[in-house]
Every structure is written in structure tokens, then in C-alpha cells.
Image (tube, helix red, strand yellow):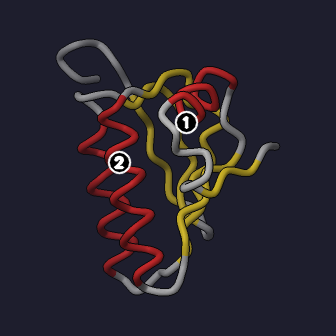
Amino acid sequence: MTEMGTQLSVDANDAGFDLNGEIDAHTAPDLESALSERLATGASTVVLDIAGVTFMDSSGLRVVIAATETARAAGGDLVLDGPQSTVQRLIEVSGLSGHLTVRSS
């Protein structure tokens, strides 16, 4: 648990990561680190199962955008799978729905 009480579990799987919890300024560095490590191994497409993410702020969006750009530069992509309505709404109001690859469950 971080000092502010928010939690994010980042569990690796074959396609990418299963995420559960909140992605904010306190937990985004954990996600950023995991994504950087995965993309550094040569994985070009990474799937983030975000069905368990209940909250994401601009810190999380920054990490997702940076990882998307890195993956696309390597010929792959970052896929956000199964966002809850609150996260989907954030993506839409931020104007990123046309930039990010989002799959609904």
C-alpha cells in the first residue's frame, strides 16, 4: 500500500498485465516500471486488462500514452482491455479515445 492508501496490483500474464485498483500519482510509477521492463524485452504489443481498475487520473494516462508510443515505435501497440465506465469516460473526455486502443469486454 502506498502512503496515501491507494493500491494497484500489477500482475504479469502472457499478453501483458492484469491491473486491479487505482492508477494515480502514487501508483503510476509502479505501472510505468512494469511496462518499461516488458517493452524493453522486445515485446511490441502489450495488453493491459484494466477491468479491475476503479480509478485513473492524468498520471495514469501519461504512463499509458508513453507506453503506447513506445510500443507503436516498435511496431506493436498497447491495448487497454475492459475499462470500467469511469476509466472509459476519462479516456473519452481527455480526447484520447481516437489515439488509444481500447477493447470493451
Q: Where is residue 17 in the image (x, y as percent from the top left)?
A: 53, 55
- Tell me the residue at 38%/26% (across/down): 57
**Residue that mark 2 sits on:** 31
State the image coordinates of residue 50 (x, y, percent, origin top left): 60, 40
Q: How crowded is mark 2: few (under 14 residues within 10 Å), some or many (20 or more)?
A: many
**Amino acid at the residue labelled 1:** Ile
Q: What residue is drawn where x is 47% and y is 76%?
A: 72
Q: Which of marks 1 and 2 is nearer the N terminus?
A: 2
The secondary structure type at the circle numbered 2 is: helix
The image quarter in which residue 15 lies: bottom right
Q: Quadrant of residue 79?
A: bottom right
| Marks 1 and 2, how far apart at CA | 17 Å
Residue 64's mark?
none
Give the residue at mark 1. Answer: 91
Where 43 falls versus 11 (above or below)? Answer: below
The mark total stands at 2
Q: In this view, does 11 lie above or below 56?
A: below
Residue at 49% over, 27% down: 21
Please tell me how crowded label 1 is: few (under 14), some (14-19), or many (20+) other residues with Cα within 10 Å: many
Name the residue type under label 2.
Leu
Q: In this view, does 87 lie to the left or right of 31?
A: right
